Amino acid sequence: MNPSFRLHVPEAFRAAHHRHAAWVDGLPGVIERLLERWSLRPDGEPGHGMAGIVLPVRRRADGLPAVLKVQRKTEDGAGVVPGLRAWDGHGIVRLLAHDTDTDALLLERLDAARPLSTLAAEDDTAATAVVGALLARLTAVPAPDGMRRLGDIAAAMVAQTPDAVRSLADPDERRLVRISADAVAELTGEAGDRLLHWDLHYANVLAGAREPWLAIDPEPLAGDPGFDLWPALDSAWETVVAPAGDVRRTVLRRFDQLTEALDLDRRRAAGWTLGRVLQNALWDIEDGEAALAPAQVALAEALLADRMR
């Protein structure tokens, strides 16, 4: 037992999940039971992101450092465990145990104080190379059966576009979203079958002991690797891309590095990246936004200008 440990749920996390108060209230008990079940002892202060609580722990049997991650069961998270098992720690955090009742994960511990953004601040070209090398390894793995499929998601986005785009105030932004939808429509028939991370931005790459850098927090999807480039293109926008002065040049340099690392057809990869711009636009419109994020516009315009060369 861990009689001296009782999780205090941070108020910011509680506020973010106010619609699921009963689940939040039950978290301390869930974590206590998992600590007992897996014979773990707390080994640091809990942290949290938008989705879940992460507690540093050590296994009592051998002292192995790990992290206990608990978040709500959702449809979006259904592919995480089969994805992590398919990757088996190659380029990504290793799964040590999974609790089917709560979807809690026991994961290899990485260095949360050293995300890839720390390298990007010194050498963004090197940081992009790290992401490219990780993506090349991750997308080399075929998606396991039952994974969500990019083809279905892409077709749904294209179908939603005509109605959704009317909510945008700027006609140029409406045109940009329609062009993005057209690019995706050209690709939906060959949407791919590789195992995608879907969210590999700089903050989702941490320094490790087993390998210098490893990916975390996948949202696995079966599809074309070109759909996995956008998070890296958009990473550290305010701290690296915008201050560089020439946004288009930085975006295209990153794009060139990533497509070369993954050996992708640049036009297809640009089309799928415009699909991510479309996806973000649809999500923002659903949330009541009437304008696109400026970074999304700049990124899309850079890729469109490159496609027209």
Image: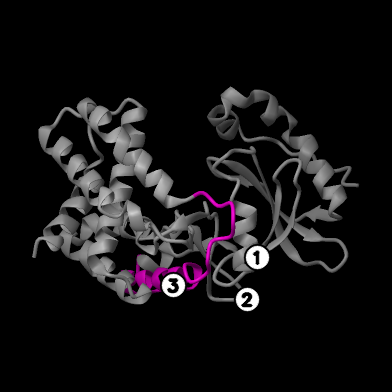
| Label 2: element kind | loop
Residue 267 x, y percent position in the rendering: 22, 64
Q: Is residue 45 magenta?
A: no
Measure the C-alpha gap from mark 1 to mark 3. Answer: 18 Å
- Residue identified by numbered label 2: 210
Residue 77 x, y percent position in the rendering: 58, 45
**Which quadrant is home to the C terminus?**
bottom left
Instruction: Give the mark nearer the N terminus: 1 vs 3.
Output: 1
Q: Are marks 1 and 2 in contact (CB under 8 Å)?
A: yes
Task: Name the residue type under label 3.
Answer: Ala
Task: Name the residue type under label 1.
Answer: Arg
| Label 1: element kind | loop
Q: Is residue 141 magenta?
A: yes
- The mark lying in front, picked from 1 and 3, is 3
Q: Quadrant of residue 126?
A: bottom left
Q: What residue is at 53 percent from the left and 40 percent from the top? A: 50
* Label of residue 136 in the image: 3
Q: Residues within 10 Å of mark 1 (few under 14, many from 20)?
A: many
**In the rendered view, would you say 244 is above or below 101?**
below
Range of residues picked out in magenta: 121-148
- Is residue 246 visible to the viewer in this orientation of the structure? no
| Label 3: element kind | helix
Q: What residue is at 45 percent from the left and 54 percent from the top? A: 198
Q: Quadrant of residue 189?
A: bottom left
**In the rendered view, would you say 153 is above or below 123?**
above
- Residue identified by numbered label 1: 94
Q: What residue is at 24 percent from the left and 37 percent from the top? A: 292
